[in-house]
Amino acid sequence: MSTHPFPRVLVVGSGIAGLTAALGAVDRGLDVVLLSKDALDETATARAQGGIAAMTAALPAGQPRDSEELHVQDTLEAGAGTCDDDAVRVLVRGSAAAIDELVAHGVDFDRTGGAGSPWLQGLEGAHSVPRILHAGGDATGRGIQRALVAAALAAESSGRLEILRHTVLVDLVLVPGGRVTGVRVLAGSGERVRELAADAVVLATGGAGQLYPHTTNPAVATGDGIAAALRAGAAVADLEFVQFHPTALAAPGCFLVSEAVRGEGAVLRDAAGRRYLEDVHPRAELAPRDVVARENVRRSLAQDGRPVLLDCTRMTPPGPGPHGTRATAEFLARRFPTIDAALRAHGVDWSREPVPVTPAAHYLMGGVATDDLGRTTVPGLYAVGECAATGVHGANRLASNSLLEGAVFGARVAGALRADALRAGRADDDAPARLVLPGRADVLPAAGRPGSPVPSGGTASPFAQDTVPLDREGALVVQHARPFEGDAVPFDADGAPVARSTAPFEGDAVPFDRRLFQDAMWAGAGVLRDRSGLEALDRRLAGFRPSSALTRRAVEDRNLLTVGRALVAAALHRTESRGAHFREDFPAPAPARARRTFWRLDTPRPAPGSPLLTSTHAITDMFDIPERIPAC
């Protein structure tokens, strides 16, 4: 029995978001258990090379040319009209404190000189000023991961934090009424099923890069938290928006060649040696990632599938000094030691020859819909990091904002856990500590307030989005419009996708095969999409029958199929091109569709008089909702 004065919190995931939330909750006196699917450092955070974007003008070693408005505007422009403006401002305003906290944990960001000198600030695509902090050159994520893991291990040693390693999330545990009260997990190498009770669960499980055969994500990125949240009835959002990094090494493993390399002067060329992005976008190689990724795919297709080439052979340190191949080799090895070692291990001397590169699935902008404190539409459930959809990334994440999101919102989740615990314990408050407040709408609206001015580049009002339910039998149902003909995507009562009449198979469904699934996702819902490809993919996925075994591999396969089917439905529903979602049959943005799309499992309607869920952005500022969101 816990002797802590506050409720027990389970944090699922050990990247920057999960570790920040767990450490922050520990510091606030909460009883915290951290669950790691694999080793503590087997995360996307540890792989992050490019750095962490931050508005540091107010810090002694910061960037004086930057401002809140500049960082906000860059983020909104990259987000292509579907960002949550309020969440973006929360992100930027919290960046200085997040950097201070990381430094306090021991992260040593690169400086222009010795101790106390200004931080070395890098420039990446779609940023108007250099604001990217690095640690160890291209090993920023590794430096952050190491520092936060050290802090977690220290908390574990002192008895303030419990850590369960090699623990796989199977599902969330709910009580009647829909509150999350714990998790079911596979624990240890024996894959024994356990149920862990909690007063609150924080999902920080990362993204779902393993949906695709080409991904920069670690093997653990199988959409576990998103799939579990869907099965628990939580709203998810923006699943159609998958960012494909334009420059992964075209070799097994898809090693990421960071955008920071292009920021330092590398250029992209076709097989004939022609530089082509200057004709596509005014920022050329520093255009938003979706622009660069699409053009790389098109150029590759035009040259019979051969990869495009990243040319770093003319890169030298800024300022006067020696030039030539030797100077380039020394600069690349010093500035990008991790990339340099990886490329040379693959037999590529990038100081002398161009690097063959291909787009690879890199970041999922969508996830479990949350407010700016991490609360979801299910009481007791929080989400943070890549598995969450706060709205800060919109349709296309601004480079290096993801580590910042994990740090800023991880800290905010920790604060919300404490505040909700105090709120639940008040004698005059008979409502449970919830992630959302009672109200009149049953699906999470976008940010904003009735009557407020339309924010530039973001969501116009609390109702400027589509709300799309999934019925309890499993069908994804389009509520406001029918974007395509045919059956919607099915899931069975256990969350496993099942075949419908659209499946092109005769007789029984075929056993799930992860490689076939990934290849189908790449072909139908990759960088370039259209209706025929998405519908063919939907039929193909409908023919897969996942195993019901309780093993890590089987659990991951079920989660991939669940998230993959939902992603395809969202991509079909968005009949336009916007940000990272590009439809060749709808190649232009549709102004009327500059809105977020929310999906959820359709739960039974509450009894008359029972509270429904309101906008989670009303947590601290309740308002009257002028109209009901149409029932789903």
Image (cartoon, grey):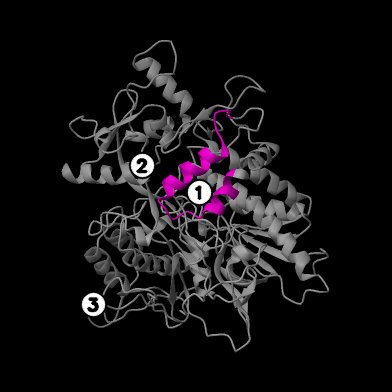
Along the horizontal axis of the image, is 314 left or right of 133? Answer: left
| Disc nearer the start of the sequence (2/1) | 1
Measured as percent of width and height from the top left, residue 235 is found at: 51, 69
Q: CA distance from mark 2 to mark 1?
A: 15 Å
Residue at image coords 35%, 56%: 212
Residue position marked by numbered label 1 in the rendering: 44
Figure quadrant of the C terminus: bottom left
The span picked out in magenta is 63-92
Residue position marked by numbered label 2 in the rendering: 248
Residue at image coords 44%, 18%: 318
Q: Quadrant of residue 202?
A: bottom right
Q: Quadrant of residue 30?
A: bottom right
- Asked if residue 301 is among those painted magenta in the image, a careful observer would answer no
SS for dot 1: helix
Q: Is residue 338 above or below residue 234?
A: above
Measured as percent of width and height from the top left, residue 221 is found at: 47, 56
Measured as percent of width and height from the top left, residue 60 is found at: 67, 28
Q: Residues within 10 Å of mark 1 (few under 14, many from 20)?
A: many
Q: Residues within 10 Å of mark 2 (few under 14, many from 20)?
A: many
Q: Is residue 225 above or below residue 400?
A: below
Q: For the residue marked with disc 3, what is the amino acid? A: Phe
Number of labels in the image equals: 3
- Does the CB distance between marks 3 and 1 fall below 8 Å? no
Depth check: 444 or 329 in front? 444
Depth check: 453 or 165 in front? 453
Q: Quadrant of residue 346?
A: top left
Q: Is residue 28 above or below residue 102?
A: below
Q: For the residue marked with disc 1, what is the amino acid? A: Ala
Residue position marked by numbered label 3 in the rendering: 505
